[in-house]
Amino acid sequence: MNPFTAAVVLAALVLLAGCGPSSTDSLTASQAATGLGTPAQDEAPVTVYYLHRSFRCDSCNAMERMTREAIRETHAQELAAGRLAFESVDFQSNEEYARRYDVNAPTVVVRWHDATAYRKLDELWGLRGDPEAFRSALAEAVNEALEKNEQVR
């Protein structure tokens, strides 16, 4: 491999390294939002966040699109009823999200229970090549959050 090709490959690897998952599932306080991409404090009991960096690579944009589409396909009734919301948030510009969800790389977060609990879904990055498995894993996490939210009412 010539030096130019090696440099291009190295640059691509460095760029892509920042697009993967951050860390494991956890519970903590969080913030609410409603509507597809329209924040409104404390209105939706369950919110799916796609937390991303300011600079967005193709993989990051695809991850947001897949998440948004999966939510629309699997939970249209909950979205329409206001029991579920989706929001895309730049965690570098909104550092409170980075602190609150312990985020240092793009990820999907599902939060529930009056904004007091959440689960990070870093495993979705590994499912990008299998849309059905991606949709299923996300739907399972959202259903779990909706059920937990109902249990505390």
Image (tube, rainbow, N blue to C red):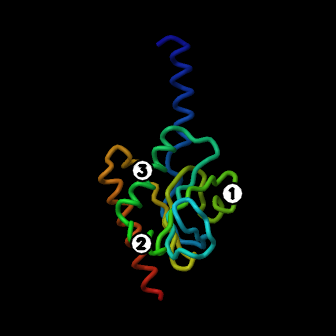
Q: Amino acid at mark 1?
A: Asn
Q: Spot the residue most to the left.
A: 132
Q: CA distance from mark 1 to mark 2?
A: 27 Å
Q: Which residue is disc 3 drawn over?
A: 66
Q: Is residue 143 above or below residue 72?
A: below
> How many other residues sit within 10 Å of disc 1, few (<14), some (14-19) or many (≥20)?
few
Q: In the displayed image of the protein, which residue is found farthest to the bottom?
A: 153
Label 3 – label 1 distance at C-alpha = 22 Å
Residue at 31%, 47% (x, y): give it.
130
Q: Which residue lies most toward the top here?
A: 2
Q: Which mark is residue 72?
A: none
Please tell me how crowded label 2 is: few (under 14), some (14-19), or many (20+) other residues with Cα within 10 Å: some
In primary-sequence order, the first of circles 1 and 2 is 2
User: Do the CB atoms of the residues marked 2 and 3 lie less than 8 Å apart?
Assistant: no
Element type at mark 1: loop
Q: Mark 2: which amino acid?
A: Glu
Quick one: SS at disc 2?
Answer: helix
- Circle nearer the viewer, 1 or 2: 2
Which residue does the numbered mark 1 point to in the structure image?
94
Marked residue nearer the N-terminal end (2 or 3): 3
Give coordinates of residue 93: x percent, y percent: 70, 52
Q: CA distance from mark 2 to mark 3?
A: 18 Å
Answer with the quarter of the image where residue 43 lies. bottom right
User: Label 2: which residue?
Assistant: 78
Rendering quarter of residue 139: bottom left
Q: Is residue 66 left or right of residue 5?
A: left
What element does badge 3 sit on?
A: helix
Q: Position of residue 141 (x, y in %)?
A: 40, 66
Q: Nearer the viewer, residue 92 or 23?
A: 92
- Under mark 3, the amino acid is Met
The residue positioned 58% from the left and 62% from the top of the image is 38
Residue 1: x and y, percent?
46, 13
